[in-house]
Amino acid sequence: MKFDDAYSGNVFIGATSDYGKAQAVIYGMPMDWTTSFRPGTRLGPKRIREVSLGLEEYSPYLDRELGEVAYFDAGDIPLPFGNPARSVEMIRDYVKQLLAHGKLPIGLGGEHLVTWGPVQAVYEKYPNLALVHLDAHTDLREHYEGEPYSHAAVIRKIVDMIGGKNVYQFGIRSGMREEFMFAKENTNFHPFTVLEPLKQRIEELKGRPVYVTIDIDVVDPAFAPGTGTAEAGGITSAEVLQAVHLMKQLNVVGFDLVEVAPVLDPTEQTQILASKIIREALLSFIR
């Protein structure tokens, strides 16, 4: 894809049309090929962009405006329907191009398997990479019903690649007993809550390249019902924004927000929260 040709009218609020001057690039990963419960996350990236037009460009949390940072919205990657392995390869290669151009990749999902693509690309550039994972689910299975390319296995793949000691998991409240046992023994595992354990881990993460992946279902379905596998008992919408603000202290070299399924939330509160998370991420992670 020629990035300068990717700009279209349906872009995240405040995006520049000049790819060359952009510090970060927003790109969509419209895939839900391995969804195991309720599909629809392939429509997430488009709707997050559309509802972003209802945002103010000013963040009162950070006292910063979107006009102070330069980011390009490249649209969605055209992924081959029903082919998760090839889709992940395409995402990986796409993000490699962004990194080669010195851009901060900001991905919109899509089911959580899509994260496997950009993390491979970022790890190739930053071999001392750490992963910060906010989610309701462990995602630590080796396969789901015999399929290794699954949203339920994405973090296990990353653990196997970068090592569990480099993976930090927060907010987890669902998974198999074996996954919880594996996490307790192999990753930096903080179930149920996010803010307090994240505060405790910030210092040791400072100075390292960090990839951040947020599954919208880390937020309680009272605040974000539009997701494929909603799980009661999550954090509030205010808490997820505070978590993003905490990570402003880190050297974030890649970020994604996944699992938004607009068709499952006619109230649009999930999509609106997702767009606000992206605004805060842009203003927190772009220097």
Image (spheres, rainbow, N blue to C red):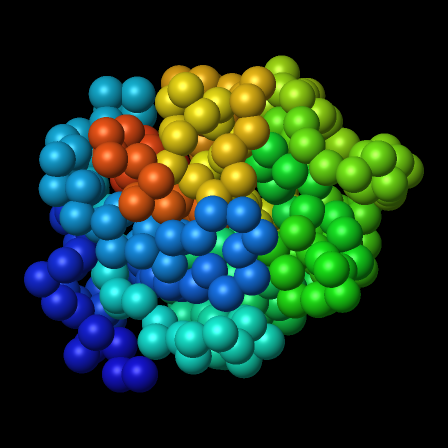
Looking at the rendered image, the quarter that the C terminus falls into is top left
Q: Nearer the viewer, residue 257 or 175?
A: 175
Q: Position of residue 187 (x, y in %)?
A: 80, 40
* Residue projecting furthest to the bottom: 2
Q: Nearer the viewer, residue 66 or 152?
A: 152
Which of the 4 image quadrants contains residue 180? top right
Q: Position of residue 61 (x, y in %)?
A: 30, 21
Q: Is residue 27 above or below residue 51?
A: below
Q: Is residue 204 left or right of residue 280?
A: right
* Residue projecting furthest to the left: 9
Q: Nearer the viewer, residue 57 or 180?
A: 180
Which of the 4 image quadrants contains residue 55? top left
Q: Is residue 219 above or below residue 73?
A: above
Residue positioned 56% across, 61% down in the render: 34
Q: Is residue 141 above or below residue 237?
A: below
Q: Is residue 86 above or below residue 47?
A: below
Q: Is residue 201 left or right of residue 228?
A: right
Q: Position of residue 8 (x, y in %)?
A: 13, 67
Q: Nearer the viewer, residue 78 or 106?
A: 78
Residue positioned 41% across, 70% down in the render: 98
Residue positioned 17% across, 48% down in the render: 50
Q: Position of residue 285 (x, y in %)?
A: 41, 43
Residue positioned 49% across, 74% down in the render: 82
